[in-house]
Image: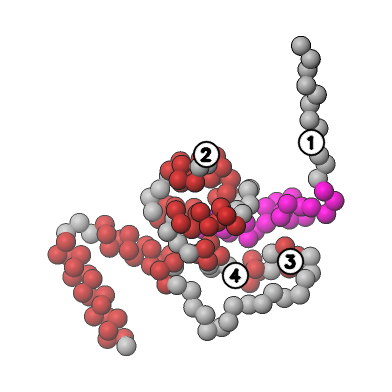
Amino acid sequence: MAQTPRKEKAPPRKGSSRGRMPSGKPNPIDVHVGARVRLRRTLLGMSQEKLGEALGLTFQQVQKYERGANRVGASRLYDLSRVLDVPVSFFFDDMNDELKSQSPAQIVGLTELQEAPAHFEHDPMAKRETLELVRAYYRISDPQVRKRVYELAKALADSAE
């Protein structure tokens, strides 16, 4: 029986860092996106295994995304947003200026990318505070107490306007 020759691993392309930092560590933006995936998954009470099943991945692959070890491509980000029921922008919320400066375009010195208009506001439904509030609200087991909390929140919002 003839042995099939082993396929040699191609050397990395010159200049290709696969989105990693010069040190070889994952790009901080990829780490941030992974942390947002983990945040939303845990807020939903979903395991890595369940998220993986919904995406056709193993829980180990989900772990790598959450650590930033594997980059999340556009189509995977879209799938994540649908499974986790958040807009794609959720994964980029709460990035500070230092983190934003770590984008590959910024690292190689390309001109400043266009910022979102100052008047643009993020969807309040995608904020961590909102998600935690909703989860706490639904943990109130007594329907009458839950209704009173709802009425209180509405009254406070109306009085602020």
Q: Is residue 126 above or below residue 56?
A: below
Q: Secondary structure at mark 3?
A: helix
Residue 30: within the magenta? yes
Residue 22 screen position, x and y as percent: 77, 55
Which numbered disc, 1 or 3, marks the residue that appears first in the sequence?
Answer: 1
Q: Residues within 10 Å of mark 4 (few under 14, many from 20)?
A: few
Where, by quadrant of the figure, is residue 109 drawn? bottom right
Q: Main secondary structure of the magenta part?
A: loop
Mark positioned earlier in the residue sequence (2 or 1): 1
In primary-sequence order, the first of circles 3 and 4 is 4
Q: Give the residues drawn in magenta, as a range.
A: 13-37
Q: Which mark is residue 58?
A: 2
* Image quarter of residue 137: bottom left
| Kind of residue at badge 4 | Asn
Q: Is residue 118 above or below residue 48?
A: below
Q: Determine whether the residue tagged by mark 1 lies in a helix, strand or loop.
A: loop
Numbered disc in front, either 1 or 4: 1
